[in-house]
Image (cartoon, rainbow, N blue to C red):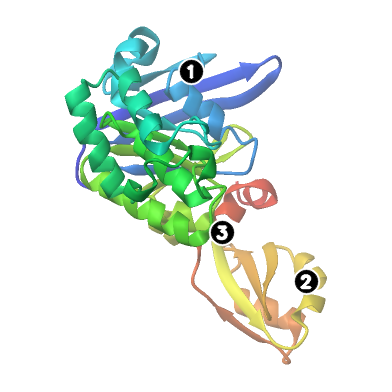
Amino acid sequence: MSNNEIIVHCKDLGKKFGDYWAVSGLDLTIRKGEIYGFLGPNGCGKSTTIRMLTGLLTPTTGKVEIMGKDVAQHGEALKSNLGYMTQKFSLYGTLTVLENLEFVAQIYGLANKDAKVRIQELLDEYQLEDKKDVLADSLSGGQKQRLALAAAVIHKPYLLFLDEPTSAVDPENRRAFWEQLFLLSAQGTTILVSTHYMDEAERCHRLAILEQGVKRADDSPSSLMENLKVHVCEISGEEVSVLKKPLFDIPNVISVSQIGPRLRVLVNKHEANPIDLLKNTVGEAFDVDFTRPNLEDVFVTSTGRGYAELA
């Protein structure tokens, strides 16, 4: 990504409900054409943030600028530049695919002639031509997802918000959906997508990890993995599960997780000789070596106990 035009900017953004801060002290800068991801567990503030960015919620602190304009002051004028796809399918199940797209085109004020051309483009692009006369309620999960995305981009928005858009579809449809997002990005659309899938987060150009409404990390997935504050080690052998508790008890061991017949162990980088440290505990019957970091390691060290111990 080489475009430096800032599409989304906010500083010290926060939202308080009663005595609870759903989002606190959030700074964001998102540039044109980026696919920017929010990764975090349910309740971490992803949806609240998206609603503030779109103007659906008024922030308690801070302000949001979209394309250089304050959302609080210019929200109505900005709407024609924004697209929004919710986690739950929100189109009309008793209307056909074509009727849904015609209705959304009217909402966005497309002239009849322009709407007809644009709808045909979307039916072809999102493989919905043969489903155009089918009721939306009768579509599969993947087809509903494609219809929802088509509706969200019918007016060619500059900025597209996607709130956990793939939570109800299978891996194949998720992969196809992301190919569509990369096409939109290449055409200059800026995309902000929330997810709790690690593989989706790794596809983003840049990524923020949220926990309890606070941003814990913000960078490209590759940079986040390269700059981990831990050594990533792997232990293999017979019945590795018996090693979990003694490994957890070692100072500087941040996390122990089992993946098939192996254990993945994160060790604080303050430990100069992590391999020797682990071998002294597991003994000669097990193999211990370094392994490549992944995004789950980033998540573990950016949240919960891992973040607390490394902060």
Q: Which residue is mark 3?
A: 296
Q: Is residue 5 visible?
A: no
> Hey, which quadrant is residue 77 in on the image?
top left
The one nearer the camera, 33 or 183, is 183
Q: Secondary structure at mark 1?
A: loop
Asked if disc 1 and disc 3 are in contact, CB closer than 8 Å, the reply is no
Q: Which residue is mark 2?
A: 244
Quote the CA–CA distance across marks 2 and 1.
Answer: 46 Å
Quote the CA–CA distance across marks 2 and 3.
Answer: 18 Å
Q: Amino acid at mark 1?
A: Leu
Q: Amino acid at mark 3?
A: Glu
User: Is disc 1 surrounded by few (<14), some (14 to 19) or many (20+) residues within 10 Å?
Assistant: some
Q: Which residue is mark 1?
A: 56
Circle nearer the viewer, 1 or 3: 1
From what the image shows, is residue 214 above or below residue 10?
A: below
> Hey, which quadrant is residue 150 in on the image?
top left
Q: Amino acid at mark 2?
A: Lys
From what the image shows, is residue 22 above or below residue 304?
A: above
